[in-house]
Amino acid sequence: MAETNKPLLIKRYASRRLYNTETSDYVTLEDIAGFIRDGREVQIVDLKSGDDLTRQYLLQIIAEHESRGESVLPVGVLNDLVRSYSTQAASVVPQFLAMSFDMLRDGQSKMMENMNPMAKMPGYDAMRAQQEAFMKAMTGGLMGSSGPQMESDDDATELDEIKKQLAELQSKLSRMSK
C-alpha cells in the first residue's frame, strides 16, 4: 500500500507523457487533478533532467478548468496575481494565499461538521453502520469494497435479514405492477 503522506511521484518522459510511479501506468492531467482532489500531494519531475515541473502542471490544470468555464478565480484576482509578479508584493502574496486557503479549508471542515447535527446524536454510529450494511447488500458489496473480507456471525445474520427484507419488497413490488 502506498504511503499517502509522501507525494505521489509522476515522471514526465521526453514524449511529454506522464507516468505514475506507484501504479506503473500513464496518467493524464485530469487524473492528476483527481489525485489532488482526493487529498494526495503530487510531485511531477522531468525524467531526463530531474527538474521539478509540479508548479507548471498545476497551473496548467487550473488554466484548463478556467478555460472550460469552471471559473474559480475572478478576473480581478487574476489581474492582481499578474501585478504581484512585478511588485514588491511578490514576497508577501504566496504566504497570504497559503494562509487564506488554510483558513478556507478550516472553515469548510467546521461548516461540514456543523451541517450534520445528527452526528452528535446517541446511536448515530450504529444507525450509519446499518445504512452501510443495507447499501452493501443492495449493491452486492460493490460500493466501497476493497476486496473479500471475513464476516462475523452477527454481520452475516444481519446481512441475511436485510437480503430477506429486500426480497420481500421486490416480491411486493412485482405483485403491485401486475
Image (spheres, rainbow, N blue to C red):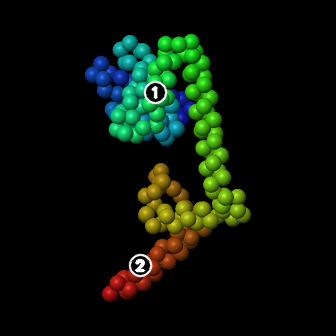
The residue pinned by badge 1 equals: 78
**Residue occupying image coordinates x 35% and y 27%:** 18
Amino acid tagged 2: Gln
Q: Label 1: how many residues lie within 10 Å, few (<14), some (14-19) or many (20+)?
A: few
> In the image, is residue 39 above or below residue 57?
below
Disc 2/disc 1 C-alpha distance (Å): 56 Å
Residue 123 drawn at (x, y percent): 69, 65
> What secondary structure is found at the residue carrying circle 2?
helix
Which corner quadrant holds the C terminus? bottom left
- Quarter of the image for residue 153 reads bottom right
- Is the C-beta separation of discs 2 and 1 under 8 Å? no
Residue 5 drawn at (x, y percent): 56, 32
The tag earlier along the polypeptide, 2 or 1, is 1
The answer to whether residue 58 is left or right of residue 106 is: left
The residue pinned by badge 2 equals: 170
Q: Foreground: 22 or 92?
A: 92
Asked whether residue 9 is in view, the answer is: no
Asked whether residue 16 is in view, the answer is: yes
Residue 99 drawn at (x, y percent): 62, 29
> In the image, is residue 121 above or below residue 106?
below
> What secondary structure is found at the residue carrying circle 1?
helix
Q: Foreground: 164 or 138?
A: 138
Amino acid tagged 1: Leu
Q: Label 2: how many residues lie within 10 Å, few (<14), some (14-19) or many (20+)?
A: few
The answer to whether residue 107 is left or right of residue 164 is: right
> In the image, is residue 13 above or below residue 165?
above
Residue 4 drawn at (x, y percent): 54, 35
